[in-house]
Amino acid sequence: MGSNVVFFGWNRPVPSRERMSAQHFEEFVNYLGGLQRKGTIQAFDIVLLDSHGGDLNGFFLIKAESAKLDALLSTAEWVTHMTRAA
């Protein structure tokens, strides 16, 4: 397994957009699952954090070889997901 990861963290959804955020979260998990099945990434972990006084409520660790992660981060699909998440 590669030792390279992309760390993608999140805070709470914007008020009144909770449903939209939950839908995108599910779509993103399915997207990552598809990347894993195709061999684009090796694995991903979803970490949900308890309240701790900070603004990080969870994160994804996306694991792959360095070259595959570099290629992933420049795809239109990735950019679309990051834009929606922002």
Image: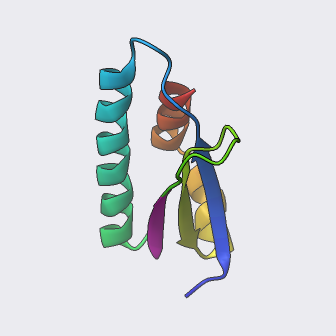
Image height check: is 36 above or below 31? Answer: below
Residue 17 image-quadrant placement? top left
Image height check: is 7 above or below 76? Answer: below
The spot of residue 50 in percent (x, y) is: 52, 51
The spot of residue 26 in percent (x, y) is: 29, 43
Q: Is residue 15 visible?
A: yes
Say whether residue 76 is left or right of residue 67: left
Say whether residue 22 is left or right of residue 55: left
Q: Is residue 80 magenta?
A: no
Say whether residue 48 is left or right of residue 65: left
> What residue sits 64% from the left and 68% below the top?
5
Q: Is residue 41 visible?
A: no
Identify the image's colour scheme: rainbow, by chain, secondary structure or one colour: rainbow
> What residue sits 32% from the left and 61% below the top?
33
Quarter occupied by the C terminus: top right
Image height check: is 65 above or below 19? Answer: below
Main SS of the magenta part reads strand
- Read off the magenta span: 42-47
> What residue sits 55% from the left and 27% below the top?
83
Of 75 and 37, the residue lying toward us: 37
Of 48 and 30, the residue lying toward us: 48
Quarter occupied by the N terminus: bottom right
